[in-house]
Image: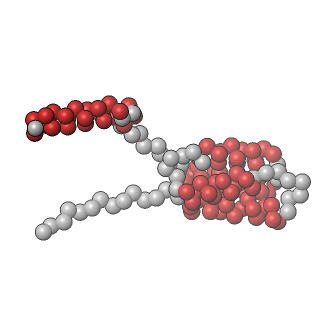
């Protein structure tokens, strides 16, 4: 009885391994986070959109922020800020304080919320 069980167990594990998608066997490639300079340039574009209320800077702001929404390593708070910026960066007939503030608020948060997190410090081996 134990012999048949020992034969069936490895075969069932082999069957499970064959069901795994091929990506499970490949190395996961780490996607780099946007640099602080890239976030700063997006922030400056958003300020320009806010100040000038022109189609060029607002479109550019949205076109740079939009692909960042799909970035796998950006935190949710950063994506919320990007989403708010994308929604607010629209040309309006009147460049009111409310319009400028709705763009400036998320733009100010970009470099803080989307800042690159420091790498964790290596742990020292514990001596017992």
Percent coordinates x, y for residue 90 in the rendering: 79, 51
Answer whether residue 117 is visible to the viewer in this image. yes
Toward the viewer: 8 or 89? 8
Percent coordinates x, y for residue 57 in the rendering: 75, 47
59 left or right, relative to 21: right
81 left or right, relative to 21: right
**Quarter of the image where the C terminus is located:** bottom left
Note whether 74 is above or below 27 in the view shown.
below
| Furthest residue toward right | 93
4 left or right, relative to 70: left
Question: Residue 107 appears in which quarter of the rendering?
Answer: bottom right
**Which colouring convention does the figure follow?**
secondary structure
Toward the viewer: 100 or 7? 7
Answer whether residue 48 is visible to the viewer in this image. no
The residue positioned 57% from the left and 60% from the top of the image is: 77
Percent coordinates x, y for residue 45 in the rendering: 70, 51
The residue positioned 60% from the left and 48% from the top of the image is: 69
Percent coordinates x, y for residue 43 in the rendering: 66, 55
**Quarter of the image where the N terminus is located:** top left
The residue positioned 62% from the left and 62% from the top of the image is: 109
| Furthest residue toward bottom | 128
The residue positioned 68% from the left and 57% from the top of the image is: 84
Number of numbered discs present? 0
Toward the viewer: 29 or 39? 29
80 left or right, relative to 26: right
């Amino acid at each position: 009885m134990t012999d048949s069980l020992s034969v069936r167990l490895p075969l069932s594990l082999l069957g499970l391994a064959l069901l795994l998608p091929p990506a499970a066997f490949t190395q996961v490639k780490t996607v780099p986070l946007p640099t602080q300079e890239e976030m700063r340039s997006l922030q400056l574009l958003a300020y320009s959109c806010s100040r000038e209320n022109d189609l060029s800077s607002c479109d550019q702001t949205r076109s740079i922020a939009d692909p960042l929404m799909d970035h796998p390593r950006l935190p949710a708070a950063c994506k919320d800020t990007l989403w708010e910026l994308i929604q607010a960066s629209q040309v309006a007939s009147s460049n009111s304080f409310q319009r400028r503030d709705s763009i400036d608020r998320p733009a100010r948060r970009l470099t803080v919320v989307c800042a690159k997190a420091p790498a964790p410090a290596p742990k020292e081996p514990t001596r017992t």
